[in-house]
């Protein structure tokens, strides 16, 4: 049992000295551990707070590449650097790239642009005519689930409480307590800084006109 799991059990009301529901074994903590892992992965993906630099070695006449990290999971690329030429590649979608260069699938040269393709593929344009160039891809990663008590939990310190709140929310939801589940879900959104994704009021737009032309322009 790690610190996050202990915190979650305290909020649930479990006696950590003599637990009667969640014992310190794989079966007793499976639900809490799975919820904490889900929360950590969601926080890392949405916030983009867990990044790694992936070094991509280009190949001759190769435009599409698969990102296959050895540890954790690839989410998306946020920045690509060409250290050899000292420049940053611009990210584009396929439609925009086609407007810039309708023949970009057949154009080779020094890579200037990149884009995402599917879940784990990126493309570069123009594609290199020779192999060996190295591009640095700073990528947002999703940590693999931890399975042991001493495994590191790859989440920022300011998001640790948020992960606990989501685990507690899911626990109450599984017990049919919608009120408590909603309460901790709101705490999760607030602690994670995601409350703005769920606005309290509908979006409104205000327009102001010249009151001489429209006497009711200032009336809302």
Image (cartoon, rainbow, N blue to C red):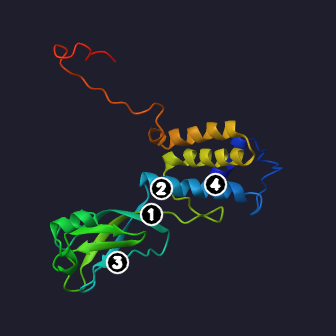
**Foreground residue among 116 and 145:** 116
Earlier along the polypeptide chain: callout 2 or callout 1? 2
Q: Residue 35 carries which label?
A: 4
Residue 45 as seen in the image, left or right of residue 36: left
Earlier along the polypeptide chain: callout 4 or callout 3? 4
Decide if residue 7 is in sight here. no
Q: Which mark is residue 100?
A: none
Q: How many marks?
A: 4
Earlier along the polypeptide chain: callout 2 or callout 3? 2
For the residues labelled 2 and 1, the Cα–Cα distance comes to: 7 Å
**Mark 4 or mark 3: which is in front?**
3
Residue 172 spot, x, y in % from top left: 71, 44
Residue 74 spot, x, y in % from top left: 44, 67
Cβ–Cβ below 8 Å for labels 2 and 1? yes
Residue ID at (73%, 57%): 29
**Kind of element beneath mark 1:** strand
**Kind of element beneath mark 3:** strand
- The residue where tag 2 is placed is 44
Earlier along the polypeptide chain: callout 4 or callout 2? 4
- The residue where tag 3 is placed is 65
**Kind of element beneath mark 4:** helix
Label 1 crowd (10 A; few <14 / some 14-19 / many >=20): many
**Foreground residue among 173 and 215:** 215
Residue ID at (16%, 16%): 213
Label 2 crowd (10 A; few <14 / some 14-19 / many >=20): many
Cβ–Cβ below 8 Å for labels 2 and 3? no
């Amino acid at each position: 049992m790690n610190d996050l799991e202990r915190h979650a059990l305290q909020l649930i009301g479990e006696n950590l000295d003599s637990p009667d529901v969640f014992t310190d074994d794989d079966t007793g903590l499976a639900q809490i551990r799975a919820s904490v892992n889900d929360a950590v992965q969601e926080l890392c993906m949405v916030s983009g707070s867990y990044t790694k630099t992936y070094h991509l070695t280009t190949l001759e006449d190769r435009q599409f590449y698969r990102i296959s990290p050895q540890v954790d999971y690839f989410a998306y690329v946020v920045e690509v650097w060409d250290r050899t030429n000292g420049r940053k590649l611009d990210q584009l979608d396929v439609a925009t790239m086609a407007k810039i260069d309708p023949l970009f699938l057949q154009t080779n040269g020094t890579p200037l642009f990149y884009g995402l393709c599917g879940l784990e593929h990126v493309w570069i344009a123009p594609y290199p005519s020779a192999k060996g160039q190295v591009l640095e891809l700073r990528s947002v990663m999703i940590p693999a689930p931890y399975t042991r008590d001493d495994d590191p939990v790859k989440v920022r310190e300011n998001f640790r409480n948020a992960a606990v709140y989501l685990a507690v929310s899911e626990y109450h939801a599984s017990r049919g307590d919608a009120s408590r589940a909603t309460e901790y879900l709101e705490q999760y959104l607030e602690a994670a800084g995601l409350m703005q994704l769920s606005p309290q009021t509908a979006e409104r737009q205000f327009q102001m006109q010249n009151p001489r032309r429209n006497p009711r322009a200032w009336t809302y």
